[in-house]
Image: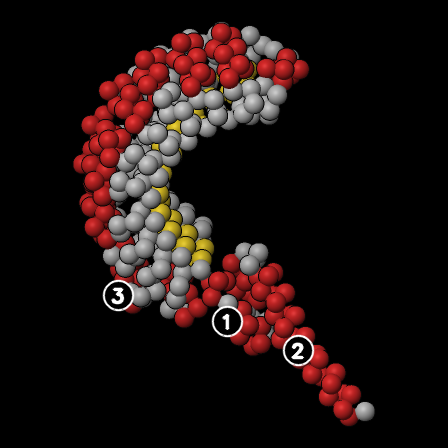
């Protein structure tokens, strides 16, 4: 009996160590970080088990949290975050330049593996904070600084100096960035894959041209709400042979001729031409004939297009187009769902001006 009891206990111990541990490892990878941290408090055994898996502690997610600066410092002081790759501070509160400077001085080695940093909406961070945090992130590949009016071209200067491997850069809403900042981007990040300069209103054709001439690997380019560019710059978008996503919403100076050059980017899958008011059927037809992999196309608010361009799109993009927004295009007649599906069998979103 005693030997049988020992055997049962050994089997239970093996089950606990192997089966339960394996299950916990699988389940834990699917939990939100807050729930994962809560699990650490369940038992010493579970704590040791979870902490022993480095892959569970590659992310620090403080999105929309209060006292985020202090929380970040506390997290980075823990050994389990020694190989963190992603930090999300998007719209968090209580994170300032001083916190990022303390990260640099107190947790210098903790960010040596960091690849992605999200500072969206962290409006108390300025150039000095960016300088501090990027100086200890040599492997950083993606950084997002959306909606920050305090950062200037000096921010870009620090970034280019400290982080040589950036391929994804979001400067949306950074209204103090100028052509000089874009020139620094172009010179420092010629392997850039994604760039968002939405509402960077101080950037002109010259700044954009720097990027278009040197960052030929771009696949995503967001120029939303930038009405100051002209065909001088738009035509050079044609240099981006691998471009997949292009947002030109509000490009009031874009002409059919400029759009014709953009059509040379024949790998485009998503194209936003909302409020590109100078565009007519001629420009859209050129896109239809060249960009036959289109999945998303918005012509919202363009009164110069008619059914003629819609027919051209149905002949070349019917196998791929899933979203077509023609709201406000008064030259395009209303059609029934059945008629639309005959033209675009894969269509799931089609808005018509009423």
Left or right of residue 17: residue 316:
left
**What is the crowding at mark 2: few (fewer than 14 residues within 10 Å), some, or many (at least 20)?**
few
Q: Which of the image's four quarters has the C terminus?
A: top right
Q: Label 2 to label 3, Cα distance in Å?
A: 44 Å
Which of discs 2 and 3 lies nearer the camera? The answer is 2
In terms of secondary structure, where does tag 3 sit? helix
**Residue at 68%, 75% in the rendered image:** 15
Front-most of residues 190 and 37: 190
Left or right of residue 132: residue 287:
right
Percent x, y of residue 220: 38, 34
In this rendering, the answer to whether 285 lies above or below 87 is above
Which of discs 2 and 1 lies nearer the camera? The answer is 2
**What is the crowding at mark 3: few (fewer than 14 residues within 10 Å), some, or many (at least 20)?**
few
Left or right of residue 251: residue 64:
right
Residue at the bottom extreme? 2
Closer to the N terminus: mark 3 or mark 1?
Answer: 1
Front-most of residues 28 and 3: 3
Residue pointed to by mark 2: 14
Q: Is residue 322 visible?
A: yes
Q: Label 2 to label 1, Cα distance in Å?
A: 18 Å
**Residue at 44%, 22% in the rendered image:** 291
- Dot 3 and dot 1 residues touching (CB under 8 Å): no
Q: Which of the image's four quarters has the N terminus?
A: bottom right
Residue pointed to by mark 1: 52
Percent x, y of residue 200: 29, 33
Residue pointed to by mark 3: 105
Closer to the N terminus: mark 2 or mark 1?
Answer: 2
In terms of secondary structure, where does tag 1 sit? loop
**Residue at 63%, 18% in the rendered image:** 341
Percent x, y of residue 106: 29, 67
């Amino acid at each position: 009996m005693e030997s049988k009891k020992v055997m049962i206990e050994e089997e239970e111990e093996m089950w606990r160590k192997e089966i339960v541990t394996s299950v916990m490892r699988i389940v834990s990878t699917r939990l939100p970080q807050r729930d994962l941290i809560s699990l650490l408090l369940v038992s010493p055994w579970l704590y040791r088990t979870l902490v022993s898996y480095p892959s569970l502690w590659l992310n620090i997610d403080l999105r929309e949290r209060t006292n985020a600066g202090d929380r970040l410092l506390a997290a980075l002081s823990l050994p389990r975050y020694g190989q963190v790759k992603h930090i999300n501070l998007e719209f968090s509160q209580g994170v300032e330049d001083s916190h990022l400077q303390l990260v640099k001085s107190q947790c210098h080695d903790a960010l040596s593996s960091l690849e992605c940093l999200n500072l969206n909406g962290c409006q108390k961070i300025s150039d000095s904070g960016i300088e501090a945090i990027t100086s200890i992130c040599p492997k950083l590949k993606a950084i997002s600084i959306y909606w920050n009016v305090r950062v200037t071209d000096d921010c870009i200067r620090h970034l280019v100096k400290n982080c040589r491997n950036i391929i994804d850069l979001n400067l949306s809403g950074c209204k103090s960035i100028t052509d000089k900042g874009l020139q620094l981007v172009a010179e420092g990040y010629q392997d850039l894959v994604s760039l968002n300069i939405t509402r960077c209103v101080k950037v002109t054709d010259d700044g954009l041209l720097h990027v278009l001439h040197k960052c030929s690997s771009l696949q995503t380019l967001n120029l939303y709400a930038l009405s100051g560019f002209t065909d001088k710059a738009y035509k050079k978008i044609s240099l981006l042979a691998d471009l997949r996503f292009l947002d030109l919403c509000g490009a009031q100076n874009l002409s059919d001729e400029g759009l014709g050059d953009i059509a040379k980017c024949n790998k485009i899958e998503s194209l936003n031409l909302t409020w590109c008011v100078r565009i007519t059927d001629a420009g859209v037809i050129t896109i239809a004939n060249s960009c036959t992999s289109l999945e998303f196309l918005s012509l919202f608010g363009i009164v110069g297009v008619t059914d003629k361009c819609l027919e051209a799109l149905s002949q070349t993009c019917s196998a791929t187009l899933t979203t077509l927004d023609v709201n406000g295009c008064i030259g395009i007649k209303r059609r029934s769902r059945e008629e639309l599906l005959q033209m675009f069998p894969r269509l799931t979103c089609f808005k018509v001006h009423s």
